[in-house]
Image: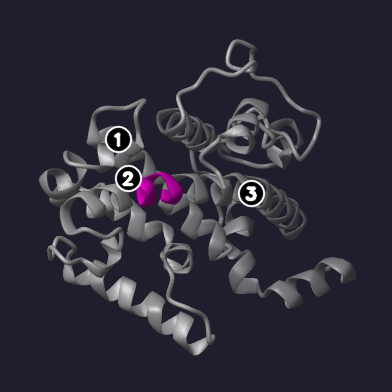
């Protein structure tokens, strides 16, 4: 065994490399694929993080206005109307406890930031269609009047986010579709046209593109987008007036 490769295998563990080795066929190809997977995950993570902030800010704004109109204050997360499920109430309680342990105030901005992507995804699930989507959350996505497409895309992106967060393989996932999902959600939240909306999508020259994936030395199929630095998506994320 090549000594540097052996050290890499010991550092990462044979167990962690095993799915890459099964796909690649040998240790060298497994390490190549692992490096590619890591670079792709890092690039996509930046866009997912920005998307999460965009979505939660948009939903929080609408929920705040709705709570003010119905309860006389904007603290929707206090759930004065008992709209939230026990699971969601537990999520809010856990967020407050983390803030208390850190010695931070339980203000709206901090509570919202403590609530994970999964919390927001489930707020657009079918169980909240009448209670939240129709009266308020649909206005957080002015570019998409139907709840189901929003829920479906956020569900897929939540799954991708969790795999990246846990350093799991993503090389066989439909990453081009996931990037398209992100662009859909951004444009549903903020449907204003921008100068890039009428330009073809092309590589920005930054990050690792699909052509750099070690596919020619691997058996099987790797699904991947044209580029990890999709300029149109990045432009929409960083220029949206809803990201604060």
- In the image, residue 129 lies at what x, y percent? 15, 44
Is 139 left or right of 52, judged from the image as shown?
Answer: left
Is 14 on the left or on the right of 91, as rendered? right
Under circle 1, the secondary element is helix
The reply to whether discs 2 and 1 touch (Cβ–Cβ < 8 Å) is: yes
The residue furthest top is 198
Image vertical order of residue 99 relative to residue 212, above or below:
below
Which residues lie in the magenta part? 56-62
> Circle 3 is placed at which residue position?
46
**Total number of numbered discs in the rendering:** 3
* Left or right: 234, with 60 as reference point: right
Q: Give the CA separation, mark 3 to mark 2.
A: 25 Å
Label 2, on which residue? 62
Q: Nearer the viewer, residue 81 or 217?
A: 81
SS label for mark 3:
helix
How far apart marks 1 and 3 lie (CA) works out to 26 Å
- Quadrant showing the N terminus: bottom right
User: Residue at position x 65%, y 27% from top?
Assistant: 226
Upstream in the sequence, badge 3 or badge 2? 3
């Amino acid at each position: 065994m090549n000594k540097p490769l052996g050290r890499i295998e010991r550092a990462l563990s044979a167990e962690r490399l095993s799915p890459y080795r099964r796909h690649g066929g040998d240790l060298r190809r497994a390490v190549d694929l692992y490096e590619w997977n890591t670079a792709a995950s890092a690039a996509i993570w930046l866009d997912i993080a920005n998307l999460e902030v965009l979505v939660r800010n948009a939903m929080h704004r609408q929920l705040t206005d709705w709570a003010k109109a119905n309860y006389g204050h904007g603290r929707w997360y206090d759930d004065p109307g008992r709209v939230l499920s026990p699971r969601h109430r537990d999520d809010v309680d856990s967020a407050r406890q983390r803030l208390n342990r850190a010695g931070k105030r339980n203000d709206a901005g901090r509570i919202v930031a403590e609530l994970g992507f999964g919390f927001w995804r489930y707020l657009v699930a079918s169980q909240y269609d009448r209670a939240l989507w129709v009266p308020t959350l649909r206005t957080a996505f002015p570019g998409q009047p139907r709840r189901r497409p929003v829920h479906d895309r956020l569900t897929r992106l939540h799954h991708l986010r969790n795999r990246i967060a846990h350093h799991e393989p993503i090389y066989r996932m439909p990453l081009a579709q996931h990037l398209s999902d992100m662009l859909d959600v951004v444009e549903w939240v903020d449907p204003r046209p921008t100068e890039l909306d009428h330009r073809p999508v092309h590589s920005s020259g930054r990050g690792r593109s699909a052509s750099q994936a070690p596919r020619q030395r691997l058996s099987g199929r790797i699904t991947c987008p044209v580029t990890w630095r999709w300029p149109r998506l990045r432009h929409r994320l960083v220029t949206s007036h809803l990201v604060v």
